Amino acid sequence: MHLSNKTPNATGEAPATAADGLRHDWSLEEIEALFALAFNDLLYRAMTVHREHFDPNRIQISRLLSIKTGKCPEDCKYCPQSAHYDTGVEKEDLMEVEAVLTAARAAKESGASRFCMGAAWKSPGKDFDVVLRMVEGVKALGLETCATLGMLNAKQAEQLKEAGLDYYNHNIDTSPEHYSKIITTRTFDDRLDTLEHVREAGLKVCCGGIVGMGEQQDDRARMLQTLVNMPRHPESVPINLLIKAPGTPLENVADVDPFDFVRTIAVARILMPQSHVRLSAGRQEMSDETQALCFLAGANSVFCGERLLTTQNPSPHTDKSLFGRLGLKPEGV
C-alpha cells in the first residue's frame, strides 16, 4: 500500500504541490488529523514517507560546541544560559579559533559530518570576525558547517555565507500562540526575520522547536504548520525534548508522554519528507526504546558527544552501542 504525502483536503482532492514537489499549504486541521491517527497508523505512514526519501538505516551525525557560554541577555524560560536565571552556568568568553578547530577535528574523527557552533548571544557583536574565521577553518576540514548565534541582519548572514557556512540554526521554539509564555525579549516575528535573512543569503536553514514546555498538542501542530508552510522547508528540523534545567522557570513542568513526543517526530517527517529530522536535545532522558521509535518514525539526525552546549547528552560509547543494536550507520558528508 503506497501512502502519498498529498493528504486529501476537505473536498477529497489532493492539494497541489509547489515547484519543489512539496506542499506548503497545510491547514491546521490536516495536521491535527495526523496527530489524531492511531499510533501504529501514524508510524506506518511516517515510515513509508521516510523510506521514499532516505535510507532508513542511515543517520546524519552532528557535533555541537558552545563557543561562547552563559550570560545571554535573552529570557528564554528553558535555557540554563540565560542571565535572567540562577542556574549555576558560568560565563565563558568566546573560544580561541584553534581550540574550536581542535574540537572540530576530533568530531570528524569520531564520525561527525557536521559541526555546529553555538554562542549565547542575542545577536553577534564585536567578535563576529572571530566567528567567521572559525567557520572558514571548520569548512577547510571538510565538515559541513552550522552556527547558531542569535538574531542576524542581512549583512551578517551574507558574511557567514561567504565564510563557508552551510547551515544556520534559528529555532522558532513553539507555536506563535504559546511563544510569549516562553520568551519576551524577542518576538516570534524577530525569529522569522532572521530566517528570511538566512534564506536570502543562500544559507540552508536548520529550524525546529522544543516539546515539553507546557504547550498543548495543538501548539505542536501550529509549530509544525509554521515550518512546513515556509516558502522552502527547513533542510534540518531539530525536535528537542525539554531538558528541565534547575533554576529555569520550566524546571518543574510536567513530563511529556514519550508516545506524544514520537508522534511529533512522525508528523514532522510526513510534513517535511525531504528534510533531516533531528532527534535533538533530551536523548539523555529517553529510553533506548523511545529513541528507536523516533528513528522508526523518521528521525534521521542526532547530535553526538557528551554535552550539548551546557546540558548532558549520551556518551559516544552509549550511542555507538545503541546504533549498533539498531543497525544504524552514519551518513557521509
Image (cartoon, helix red, strand yellow):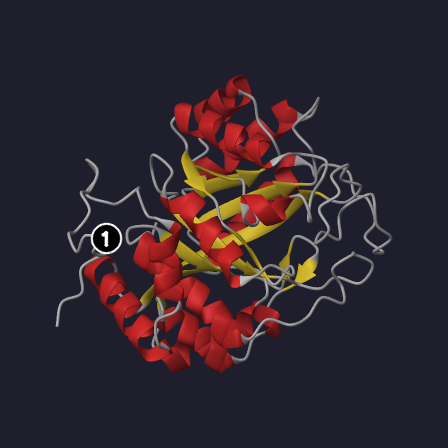
Residue 308 figure quarter: bottom right
Extreme top residue here? 155
Please state if 140 lies on the left or on the right of 244 as rendered. left
Query: As rendered, which of 298 and 10 lies closer to the eye?
Result: 10
Which residue lies under the disc numbered 1? Answer: 9
Residue 242, percent from left and from top: 63, 62
Q: Amino acid under label 1?
A: Asn
Q: Residue at x 31, y 59 (%)?
A: 270
For label 1, the crowd category at 10 Å Cα-Cα, with few meaning under 14, some 14 to 19 and many 20 or more, is few
Residue 320 shows up from this direction? no
Residue 244 figure quarter: bottom right
Residue 145 shows up from this direction? yes
Query: As rendered, which of 209 and 24 lies closer to the eye?
Result: 24
Residue 287, percent from left and from top: 54, 80
Please state if 196 lies on the left or on the right of 69 as rendered. left
Q: Residue at x 34, y 59 (%)?
A: 269
Secondary structure found at label 1: loop
In the rendered image, the vertical position of residue 177 relative to residue 44, given as above or below: above
